[in-house]
Amino acid sequence: MKESVKVQVAGVTFFVVTEDGKERTEEIADKVNSKINNLVLQTTNCTKMKAAALCAMDYCRESMEQKEEILRLEQKIKKLEGELARGKNAKAGSFLDLDKSGVN
């Protein structure tokens, strides 16, 4: 069930409508805040706004990389399933050949 959760990110307070629940949403906000604060502290002349934009770009890059990896793994699974099916069919065919030859 969707609920409205109050969070603060980069000094801005707002409400997030989510199905993830309050604890999960606050955990996500805390992680984003931590990353933003680290960028501000480690980078010269980095405002919270710039850090938030960099943070968003970094999370987007990570998401894209994960989607690409999922696609690659799904393709690998399909390939292996095909190889397994071909192997089973070849094995079944060899058993049929034995039955035809009268060897049991």
Image (cartoon, rainbow, N blue to C red):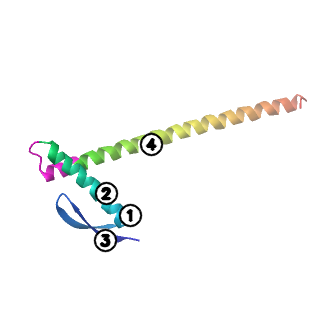
> What is the crowding at mark 4: few (fewer than 14 residues within 10 Å), some, or many (at least 20)?
few
- Depth check: give the residue in front, 53 or 41: 41
Q: Is residue 68 above or below residue 32?
A: above
For label 2, the residue is 28
Point out the tag, 4 or 1, that comes first from the N-terminus: 1
**First along the sequence among labels 3 and 4:** 3
- Dot 2 falls on a residue whose secondary structure is helix
Q: Secondary structure at mark 3?
A: strand
Give the residue pinned by disc 4. Answer: 71
Q: Tell me the mark number nearer the camera, choosing from 4 and 1.
A: 1
Q: Earlier in the sequence, mark 4 or mark 2?
A: 2
Residue 7 in the image: state x and y as whole percent. 25, 65
Distance from Cα at disc 4 to Cα at disc 2? 25 Å
| Badge 2 or badge 1: first in the primary sequence | 1
* Residue drawn at x 28%, y 58% as measured from the top left: 29
- Left or right of 59: which side holds 69? right
Q: Which residue is mark 3?
A: 4
The answer to whether 94 appears left or right of 27 in the picture is right
Answer few, some or many: residues within 10 Å of disc 1's Cα (few below 14, many 20 plus, some between 14 and 19): few
- The circle drawn on residue 20 is 1
Image: 55 above or below 100: below
Q: Which residues are magenta?
A: 44-54
Q: Residue at x 15, y 48 (%)?
A: 40
Marks 2 and 1, Cα distance to the nearest angstrom? 10 Å
Q: CA distance from mark 3 to mark 1?
A: 10 Å
Viewer-nearest residue: 44 or 69: 44
Residue 68 place in picture, x, y as percent: 40, 41
